[in-house]
């Protein structure tokens, strides 16, 4: 995992901090129902869906959970170790049947940076992330060297206190206020 992640970090060193929507996406958001994604997050945030493997004992289940929420988007590929594949087949923890991009935070980041209609990197959570993030969008929390270590899905926002709430698996809590995040992060727009 460390070697794979290092290779990904080397590949992305010159990636932009933001990708702007151009009207041309690699994967169409057609079929992505962000309301369904949010409802799925509410339903399975605390009660894991037994139709999917639970990767908690293997380093975490956060990207797997976010991927499940995004399931309205088409699964792609068949090579589990390829950054161009994104799929989950079956309910067992089998690394040949669940791609690294589906189940691993850093591989998830690499896949969606190239396929989300747009994304933006922030130094930390706050008003800027509140203004950019919508329910159904996904967030990667990053280390200082840019490696994703946690994945969340936005479920709601509050105009009163300008906060955005995200759900995740394998975190210190089910719900997390994005304005309280003090590490670098990327928000992927899945709606356009």
Image (tube, rainbow, N blue to C red):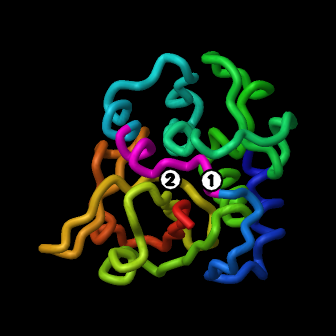
Q: Nearer the viewer, mark 2 or mark 1?
A: 1
Q: Residue at x 69, y 80 (%)?
A: 22
Q: Residue at x 76, y 77 (%)?
A: 13
**Quadrant where the N terminus is found in the figure:** top right
On residue 150, which mark appears?
2
On residue 30, which mark appears?
1
**Residue 24 drawn at (x, y percent):** 74, 72
Q: Which residues are magenta?
A: 29-39
Give whichever of 131, 94 is nearer the camera: 131
Q: Is residue 16 above or below residue 50?
A: below
User: Is label 2 in a helix, a strand or a loop?
Assistant: strand
**Residue 32 drawn at (x, y percent):** 55, 49
> Could you classify mark 1 by the number of other residues whose Cα lies within 10 Å: few (under 14), some (14-19), or many (20 or more)?
few
> Could you classify mark 2 by the number of other residues whose Cα lies within 10 Å: few (under 14), some (14-19), or many (20 or more)?
many
Task: Please identify the quarter of the rendering in which residue 88 is found.
Answer: top right
Give left or right: position of 140 versus 175.
right
């Amino acid at each position: 995992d460390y070697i794979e992640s290092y290779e990904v970090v080397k590949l992305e060193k010159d990636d932009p901090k933001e990708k702007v929507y151009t009207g041309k996406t690699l994967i169409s958001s057609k079929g992505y129902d962000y309301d369904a994604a949010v409802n799925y997050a509410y339903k399975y945030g605390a009660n894991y869906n037994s139709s999917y493997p639970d990767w908690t004992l293997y380093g975490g289940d956060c990207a797997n959970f976010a991927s499940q929420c995004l399931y309205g988007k088409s699964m792609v590929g068949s090579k589990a170790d390829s950054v161009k594949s994104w799929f989950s087949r079956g309910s067992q923890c089998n690394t040949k049947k669940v791609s690294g991009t589906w189940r691993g935070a850093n591989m998830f980041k690499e896949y969606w940076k190239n396929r989300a209609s747009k994304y933006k990197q922030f130094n930390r959570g706050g008003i800027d992330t509140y203004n950019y993030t919508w329910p159904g969008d996904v967030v990667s929390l990053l280390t200082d060297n840019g490696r994703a270590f946690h994945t969340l899905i936005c479920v709601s926002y509050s105009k009163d206190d300008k906060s955005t709430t995200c759900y995740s698996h394998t975190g210190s809590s089910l719900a997390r206020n994005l304005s309280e995040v003090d590490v670098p992060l990327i928000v992927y727009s899945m709606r356009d």
